[in-house]
Image (cartoon, helix red, strand yellow):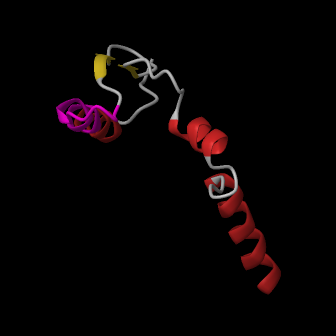
Amino acid sequence: MGSVFPSVARLDFHRDVRLLAALEDPRLARVLGLCSRGEPLCVALEYLPHGDLHRYLRTHAPDQYADPRALLSNQVNNETSVR
């Protein structure tokens, strides 16, 4: 059975995890582990008491934070309506 992830994507994943693991900042979740045998590829990150950044921003600054998915959707809709 073939891999869902091409070898280039797998190498990119490993590189990105190594870069993230090398960062040392109390405001960032630390990498605790990596599972790259088989699929899916997984990264274990430190527990964050406030949840993920998306949820934190929506909770603490809802008027100042726009969902990037909504922005992209609006951009696509605007581009198709212009044509």
Instruction: Residue lying at the far left in this picture: please name it.
Output: 22
Q: Nearer the viewer, residue 57 or 34?
A: 57
Q: Is residue 23 magenta?
A: yes
* Residue 78 located left or right of residue 45: right
Residue 83 visible somewhere in the drawing = no
Instruction: Residue lying at the far right in this picture: please name it.
Output: 81
Q: Is residue 35 magenta?
A: no
Compared with 26, 73 (above or below) is below
Quadrant where the N terminus lies? top left
Q: Residue at x 34, y 35 (%)?
A: 27
Q: Nearer the viewer, residue 48 or 71?
A: 48
Could you say where residue 48 lies in the image, as x and y percent from the top left?
45, 23
Residue segment shown in magenta = 16-28
* Residue 75 located left or right of residue 30: right
Could you say where residue 34 lies in the image, as x and y percent from the top left?
30, 18
Q: Residue at x 21, y 38 (%)?
A: 19
Q: Nearer the viewer, residue 82 or 59?
A: 59
* Residue 54 located left or right of residue 44: right
Could you say where residue 21 lies in the image, as x and y percent from the top left?
22, 29
Could you say where residue 65 lies in the image, as x and y percent from the top left?
62, 55
Q: Quadrant of residue 37?
A: top left
Q: Nearer the viewer, residue 23 or 9?
A: 23
Compared with 57, 42 (above or below) is above
Quadrant where the C terminus lies? bottom right
Q: Quadrant of residue 66?
A: bottom right
